[in-house]
Image (spheres, rainbow, N blue to C red):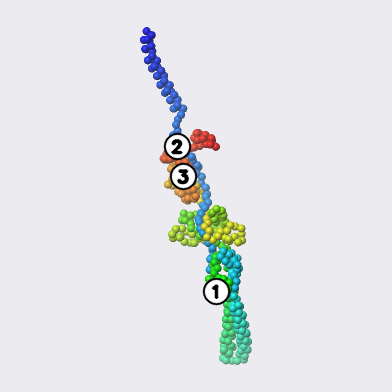
Amino acid sequence: MNKLWIKIALPVLVLGLGVAGMSLINATAQQKEDKEEVDTRPTVSVDEANAEDYQVMITSFGEVRPLEMTKLSAQVSGEVMSWHPNFVAGGVIPRGTTLFSIDKQRYEAAVLQAEAELNQAQSLLIEEQARARVAAEEAKSMEASQVTDLYLRKPQLMSAQAAVKSAEAKLKLAKRDLSYCDVKAPYDALVVSRTIGLGQFVSQGTQVGEIYNIETAEVTLPIAGFDSRFLPTPLAGTPVTITSRGINSYSRQGTIDRDLGMVEKSTRMSQVVARIEDPYSLRNQAPVFKFGSYVEVSMAGQTLQQVYRLPQDLVTNRTVWLVDKDMQLQPVKVDVLREEGKYFLINDGLSEGDKVITTVPEYPQKGMKVKVAKDDPKLVAQNAETE
C-alpha cells in the first residue's frame, strides 16, 4: 500500500516542482526586463554655435633686405690719403661720415685757378660796362642813324658777361671736384666690402666698395590668393609684427609700405613690402634684425562680421553634424569662408544656437537617435569621479 502511494505521489511532486521552478524563472526574468531598459543610442557631446566678429590674421615669411645697396665709386682721380677705421667689411658708419679721402692738392689748385679766371672776367666786364656807359652818353649828341649796337658796345658787353658766367661755371665744377675728394656715407651704412688701400691711386669711376642702408630695411612678403581678399584697406601703413624664430625668438614692429602690384608667375602670389626702421638698432634698444634673416610677419586683416569658428575636424566635406530638438542627427552643408590655424571660419549654413556635435559617432546617419553626454547619468557620474 505504502509503495503504491509513493509511486503515485513522487511523479506528481516532481511535476509540481518543475512548474513552480519555471514560474519562478519567468517571474525573475520579467522583473529584470521591467527593471533594466538598455539604451542603445550613441552618446555624443555638443557645443552651441555662437556667431562672432572675427579679426583675420594674415601671416607670411620673407627675408630682411636693405632698402638701398650702393656700390661706391671714386668721382675724381687721385691717391688715397686716408680711410675711416670702420670702412671695413662689417663696419657700421653713421650718415655723413667720411669713408676715405683722395689727395686734394690738384683740385685745390684748380679752384684757385678758376677763382683767378673769374676775377679776370669780372674785371673785363666792369671795363666793358664803363665803355658802354661812355658810348651811351656820347650817342645822345649824335643822330639816331649814326648810333649802332656796335657803337654802344653791346656785343663787347655781352661777350664780357658770357666770360663771367663761364668762369663762374668753371669755379663751381672745381669746387665740386674738390668736395668729391672726401667720399661721405650718404646714409647710416653697413660696409659690405672695401677694395682700396692707403696710397693707392684710383681713377674716376673706379669701384672702391659696397655699402647697405641700415636706416630702413624691407621684407618682401608673398601673399596667397586666399589671403589677398582679406588684406586690410588701405594697405599702406598697416602695422605688422616681425618675428625672428629660433632658440631665442624676438619681435619688433614695422609697417606695410606698398603692394608691388604684380602676381609672381611661378607661385601666382601677390607681393607686399613691409619696412623696419633702424633694423640694426643704432637709435633704440630694440632687437637687431640683420640683413639676410628669415622672419615671420603677421598683420591684422579685415574683420569678418558674424562668422562661426569651428575646429577643422568637425567639418567633413563641408558638412557639419547637428543634434535637432528630437535628439536626432542632422547633416548641414556649410560655407567655409577661410581656414585659419586649426579652425574653419563659416559664414553660411549654421544658425545661432545650433547644437554642433563635437564627438561624431563612428557611422553617423541622418535621423540617428543620440543622447547628449551631459544627459547620461552614468557619464555624469563618471565625470564627477574623474574630477
Q: Nearest the camera: 247 or 145? A: 247
Residue found 61% across the figure and 58% down from its top: 285
Coordinates of residue 241 in the picture (x, y in percent): 55, 55
Residue 373, compared with residue 125, is above or below; it is: above
Instruction: Identify residue for label 2.
Output: 42
- Mark 2, Cα crowd under 10 Å, few <14 / some 14-19 / many 20+, is some
Real-space Cα separation, disc 3 to disc 1, in angstroms: 72 Å
Instruction: Identify residue for label 3.
Output: 314
Coordinates of residue 297 in the picture (x, y in percent): 53, 56
Instruction: Identify residue for label 1.
Output: 202
Real-space Cα separation, disc 3 to disc 2, in angstroms: 17 Å
The amino acid type of the residue labelled 3 equals: Leu
The image quadrant that residue 186 belongs to is bottom right
Q: How many marks?
A: 3
> Which one is earlier in the sequence, the residue at label 3 or at label 1?
1
Task: Identify the secondary structure beneath mark 3.
Answer: helix
